[in-house]
Image (tube, rainbow, N blue to C red):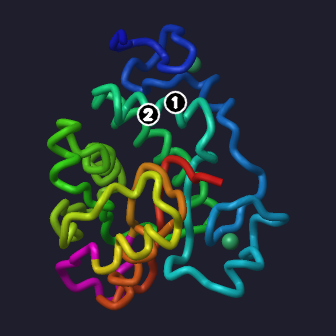
Amino acid sequence: MLTMVGYCWLCHQNLYFAHHGVCHVCHQQLKRRQHVCPRCALPSESGDVPCGRCLKYPPPWQSLIAITDYTPPLSQLIRRYKYHNTPQLAAVLARLFLLHWLQGYREGRWYKPDHILGIPLHSKKRWQRGFDHIELMIQPLSRWLQCPYQPDLLQCSRATLSQRGLSAAQRKTNLKHAFQLRGDFTDQHVAIFDDVITTGTTLHEASQLLIRAGARSVQAWAICRTL
Ligand SMILES: [Zn+2]
Ligand SMILES: [Zn+2]
């Protein structure tokens, strides 16, 4: 795979700003949904009020923010980033998220967080991949938003099996008490970042820890949301 410095990762055209990684046209063409539930980011009739499921079983987080569904081209870009040793895509994906987040922020849909946390990667996985893909995306976000990020505040408390290929119920058991949270989050707005949110089980566990540690609100951030 070519490293495409100066070219758009999606359409391979020359970029005016090489560091952007994705051109303006491709950015505009990302298939964003018109209406998603603000709490779970699943398709809904109106983007303003939570869906029926979230009203009945409110998740511990206030908003779930993802750029698009887990569909091409972002799903392909994420796979290339994680599984094809392409850490240079971290800032490209982070920038796409930033633009998406800023739009909602300007419209008053969510707060600026006081802290960003990342869903921790098990050390074995990090070793296999050679980099922590979550940490690499949060670093530029934290810089651009001037929002503190300390990678070790949320940690794996024991070896969890990979979540891939497990049912929702199995994921829940697998994750029980999987994380440890350090620090006092009293009255803080906190964002938790993951690359892709699927069942939300991981996020649920981490958000509950934050609420118990006093957090005022939790935002779930992701590049993509699986339907
Ligand atoms: Zn392009
Ligand atoms: Zn919902």
Beta carbon of the mark 2 residue lies under 8 A of ligand 1: no
The residue lying at 35 percent from left, 70 percent from top is: 174
- For label 2, the SS is helix
| Residue bearing mark 1 | 76
Quadrant containing the C terminus in the rendered view: bottom right
- For label 1, the SS is helix
| Residue bearing mark 2 | 79
Is disc 2 in contact with disc 1, using a CB cutoff of under 8 Å? yes
Q: Describe residue 172's horizontal placement relative to residue 161 as left or right.
A: right
Callout 2: 10 Å neighbours few (<14), some, many (20+)?
A: few
The residue lying at 17 percent from left, 49 percent from top is: 124
The type of residue carrying mark 1 is Gln
x, y percentage for residue 139?
26, 48
> 104 or 12, which is in the foreground?
12
Q: Describe residue 12's horizontal placement relative to residue 93 as left or right.
A: right
The residue lying at 50 percent from left, 73 percent from top is: 169
Q: In this view, does 16 lie above or below 39?
A: above
x, y percentage for residue 109?
61, 67
Q: Describe residue 127's horizontal placement relative to residue 52 as left or right.
A: left
**Residues drawn in magenta:** 178-190
Q: In this view, does 222 lie above or below 201?
A: above
x, y percentage for residue 216?
42, 86
Quadrant containing the N terminus in the rendered view: top left
